[in-house]
Image (cartoon, helix red, strand yellow):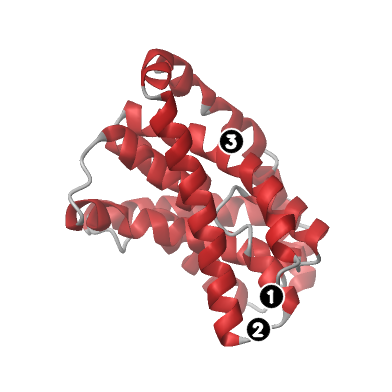
């Protein structure tokens, strides 16, 4: 079956876009957090690949065209941040403390979990950058001795899970302040969380996009230090 699609360069691109479109339609019919378009589209794409015996390399020949757009799409998140520059200046201290606390909490949680479960160091190193955007996470994972494939998978799962439970968590803990919501989503669920934050509002989206950048930089500094502890 792979031979049929190898000659079709845009198969992965078409499958990805079509899966996402179907997922959006499902979300419109069933507007519940669990029916997140990214989660549903991933399930559809995987199901198609498994059913037809298509390997990832064949799929990625076309899907890579979407991946290329990841970096410029992330850069575009600076636009809502620019619009909220005054708000950023007003709450600068609180924002810095929040981001630093979030990054440290995430890394410490991974360290404790891996220590208790006595996991292989490679797994530990692969999990450390789970809450930051994929492009930065892969670089950190490779540098500290992790497996980039595991890192990518964990980053995606973290982002989707964060987007799925975001509204419920905010409601449960009565987190209503737009800055707090945005920082939490960007700090814990990177770009996927930011797409969810934009659904909450422009301020949430701006703060979440800020979190992606700052959390990434802080993780680059802290992760290599913590990596040697296990």
Q: Nearer the viewer, mark 3 or mark 2?
A: 2
Q: Dot 2: few (<14), some (14–19), or many (≥20) neighbours within 10 Å?
A: few
Identify the residue position indicated by label 3 in the image.
213
Seen at 71% across and 69% down, the residue is: 229
Viewer-proximal residue among 151 and 223: 223
Tag 2 and tag 1, C-beta contact below 8 Å: yes
Q: Residue at x 49, y 20 (%)?
A: 79
- Which of disc 3 and disc 1 is earlier in sequence? 1
Q: Is residue 113 left or right of residue 31?
A: right
> Residue 224 or 49: which is nearer the viewer?
224
> Is the residue 169 above or below the residue 126 in the image?
above
Q: Position of residue 15 (x, y in %)?
A: 57, 57
Disc 2/disc 1 C-alpha distance (Å): 7 Å
Q: How far apart, in angstroms, are the residues tagged by discs 3 and 2? A: 29 Å
Q: Earlier in the sequence, mark 3 or mark 2?
A: 2
Q: Position of residue 145 (x, y in %)?
A: 81, 66
Label 3 sits on a secondary structure element that is: helix
Taking the spot 42% from the left edge, 41% from the top edge, the residue there is 98
Q: Which residue is mark 1?
A: 123
- Closer to the camera, 179 or 154? 179
**Number of residues whose C-alpha sits closer than 10 Å to that of mark 3, classed few (under 14), some (14–19) or many (20 or more):** some
Disc 1 to disc 3, C-alpha distance: 24 Å
Q: Which mark is residue 119?
A: 2
- Assign a secondary structure to mark 1: helix
Residue 107 is situated, as x and y percent measured from the top left of the image, at 57, 60
């Amino acid at each position: 079956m792979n031979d049929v699609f190898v000659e079709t360069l845009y198969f992965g691109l078409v499958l990805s876009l079509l899966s996402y479109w179907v997922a959006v339609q499902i979300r419109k019919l069933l507007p519940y957090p669990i029916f997140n378009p990214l989660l549903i589209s991933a399930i559809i794409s995987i199901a198609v690949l498994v059913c037809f015996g298509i390997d990832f390399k064949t799929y990625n020949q076309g899907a890579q065209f979407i991946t290329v757009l990841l970096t410029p799409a992330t850069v575009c998140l600076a636009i809502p941040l620019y619009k909220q520059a005054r708000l950023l200046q007003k709450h600068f201290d609180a924002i810095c403390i929040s981001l630093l606390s979030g990054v440290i909490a995430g890394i410490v949680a991974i360290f404790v979990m891996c220590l208790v479960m006595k996991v292989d160091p490679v797994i530990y190193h692969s999990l450390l950058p789970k809450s930051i955007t994929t492009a930065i996470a892969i670089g950190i994972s490779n540098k500290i001795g992790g497996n980039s494939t595991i890192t990518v998978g964990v980053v995606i799962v973290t982002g989707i899970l964060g987007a799925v439970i975001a509204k419920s968590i905010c409601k449960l803990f009565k987190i209503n302040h737009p800055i707090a919501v945005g920082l939490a989503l960007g700090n814990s669920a990177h770009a996927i969380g930011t797409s969810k934050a934009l659904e909450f509002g422009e301020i949430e989206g701006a703060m979440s996009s800020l979190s992606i950048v700052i959390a990434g930089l802080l993780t680059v500094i802290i992760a290599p230090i913590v990596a040697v502890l296990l």
